[in-house]
Amino acid sequence: MQRMIQTRQVTRSLARTIQHRSRLPVHRLYSHGARQGNPRGIASPWSFLLGAGVTGAGFTLWQFAQPKSQSEKQQSNYADRETMLKGVQAISDALGPESVTMDEEDIELHSYSEVSTSNCATRPVAVVTPKSTAEASVIARICSEYKIPMIPFAGGSSVEGNFTAPYSGLTVDFSQMNQIIAFHEDDLDVVVQPGVNWMDLNEKIKDSGLFVPMDPSPTALVGGMVATNCSGTNAARYGTMKDWVINLTVVLADGTVIKTRHRPRKTSAGYNLTGLFTGSEGTLGMITEITLKLAPVPEKQSVAFATFPTIREAVACTTKIMRQGIPIAAVELMDDVQMGVLNKNGGAGGRTWEEKPTLLFKFSGTPQSIATDIGRVERITSEGGGSAFEFARTEQEMHNLWSARKEAVWAMVAQRPEGTQIWSTDVAVPLSRLPETIDLSKKESGSLGLFSSVLGHVGDGNFHQAVMYNPNDPAQTRAVQECVRKMVHRAVEMEGTVSGEHGIGLGKKECLVEELGPDTIAVMRTLKRSLDPHCLMNPGKVFEP
Ligand SMILES: Cc1cc2nc3c(=O)[nH]c(=O)nc-3n(C[C@H](O)[C@H](O)[C@H](O)COP(=O)(O)OP(=O)(O)OC[C@H]3O[C@@H](n4cnc5c(N)ncnc54)[C@H](O)[C@@H]3O)c2cc1C
Ligand SMILES: *[C@@H]1O[C@H](CO)[C@@H](O)[C@H](O)[C@H]1NC(C)=O
Ligand SMILES: *[C@@H]1O[C@H](CO)[C@@H](O)[C@H](O)[C@H]1NC(C)=O
Ligand SMILES: *[C@@H]1O[C@H](CO)[C@@H](O)[C@H](O)[C@H]1NC(C)=O
Ligand SMILES: *[C@@H]1O[C@H](CO)[C@@H](O)[C@H](O)[C@H]1NC(C)=O
């Protein structure tokens, strides 16, 4: 009981931090938990770990990424503060004073993380809130005229795709553009503004039997989700955000409004501009309208788990399951450390767990297909050295089992010693290399004396490592930096990626160069220059201007 209260307090304080940043009502964050009973809403429990990890990642990665003389050079291309203020006045005249705030607290909420040990010193001069595409276009035109950087802002939950303003400028907050514009039930699509929250959207359209199958932070808004190409636990079955975006309306840096294409499900007409803006982290334009594909809510879902002697055997099983084409909805790996943390925290789902590498499976389909799939997965796991296979026979059991995955993060946060922070980072590698890279990452963090746990969206070769460290201890901070640097470097060596789902932002710019090489980055720069010649859109993110 004591523990539960502790967890809840920590969760609540994290919730407050996130809510603070995103200005979402706190009840929405709690409804995340309450929605456990809703099969469509099985939202990523990464939520709170990342909420905590933000601090650590922000701090240390910032050290890698701080623009140095570059930044001074760049700075001179932009308006000085006085000119920026003139631009703000022009926007206020055009859109009305209620669309602009220079309130210090508002600015902090949009650009600074209060719990962070180190923050980018510059701030935007104001926050502007457009209510339509036309207003966003006016903002861009004025910013373009005065050479003011624009930093799009949606839910504010991004981890690397960070919304800080290293060159000052204006934060463009899309949370007021929160309307569902058209719902085409028979076309299985919905047209929304960028400020629509994905959980609200799913709630509103639930009677249609359709839903948006991504599950990033419960506070994320569709605009930010497209801009980061987000995913979550459902990706094994449903892919990532890019698979669900049909077309976009985008306001370019100079105020031009474009629509990337029409609304049919397929097209082979012209370059893929929808794909270009998806995952562009606000550096190419402001997304002001999105047509999303919707998926039918599965008739039934179930959950099962199995434990394994080693991570290697667990991953081997996952590969086999995928190769046999068993359509699992999600497969999540938790290591022995993570299971231990759950137990220390009083268990999860009303039980304690074996402290061994564990796979949690989610199934969806008809009752018959699920029964078949569970049977096949059970056979493969037992042939592959797994034991303790167990599946949910009732809806309640399903929630109990899945709560191991959901509670994981909260347990880690609750069990963390005072004064420590959690640094969460993610990489993805080709499936066959996953066990090796997880083993090495665990060994390295162990040898540096750091406490770390692993959670993985193993179906995609994507894993998150959460490392605890004391930010006030320089040796530990260096150790955690080194640990992450090696993990990222190894992922690249294995033909993987430096970020499976969180994006590049400020934090992983140098890593991106390592992954793609200077020529590829040069092509990205050329694209950027052609759309945004004065580098006004979210400058300093993804790559150096
Ligand atoms: C609690 C928690 C859990 C998470 N779990 C997951 C997970 O499981 N999977 C996952 O993929 N991610 C996860 N994340 C990361 C995060 O939720 C996603 O990256 C999400 O897509 C960000 O959306 P947002 O609305 O908060 O965007 P923001 O943080 O506001 O912005 C993200 C980026 O998009 C840009 N942007 C925002 N709006 C626009 C726009 N209209 N036009 C152009 N650019 C824009 C911003 O400039 C910024 O670069 C998690 C984060 C947290 C804090
Ligand atoms: C954004 O980056 C800054 C500077 O690196 C960091 O202090 C802050 O915590 C980060 N915020 C988020 C939400 O990632
Ligand atoms: C997508 O294309 C349709 C026309 O087929 C258009 O009406 C709609 O506005 C477009 N959506 C977006 C988000 O641009
Ligand atoms: C274009 O990009 C969109 C969004 O990223 C994606 O869904 C679509 O499959 C892409 N089309 C092609 C032909 O690659
Ligand atoms: C989006 O994510 C998918 C899966 O990781 C990836 O294949 C695709 O290239 C990404 N697209 C963009 C535009 O980031």
Image (cartoon, rainbow, N blue to C red):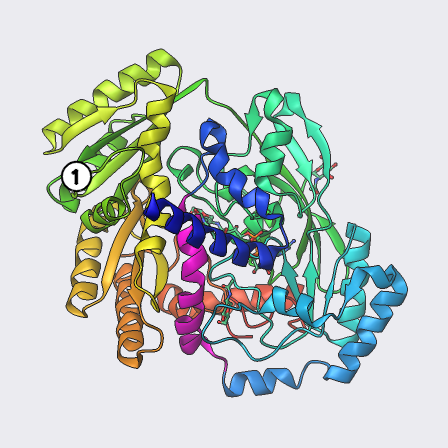
Residue lying farthest right? 93
Q: Amino acid at mark 1?
A: Glu
Residue 115 against residue 48 in the figure, above or below: below
Helix, strand or loop: magenta stretch: helix
Residue labelled with disc 1: 354
Quadrant of image for the N terminus:
top left
Residue 310 point in image, percent of width and height: 12, 45
Q: Nearer the viewer, residue 501 or 472?
A: 472
Q: Residue at x 56, y 75 (%)?
A: 545
Up-down relation of residue 129 to residue 38 (above or below): below
User: What residue is shown at x 65% (from left), y 76% (from top)?
Assistant: 168
Extent of the magenta region: 45-67
* View quadrant of ligand 3: top right
**Image position of 409 with respect to 519: above or below:** above
Residue in the picture at 90% in, 66% down: 93
User: Of all residues shown, which one is farthest toward the front?
Assistant: 2
Residue 362 painted magenta: no
Q: Position of residue 89 (x, y in %)?
A: 85, 72
Q: Is residue 267 visible?
A: no
Q: Is residue 522 left or right of residue 27?
A: left
Q: Residues within 10 Å of mark 1 (few under 14, many from 20)?
A: some
Q: Residue at x 18, y 40 (%)?
A: 314
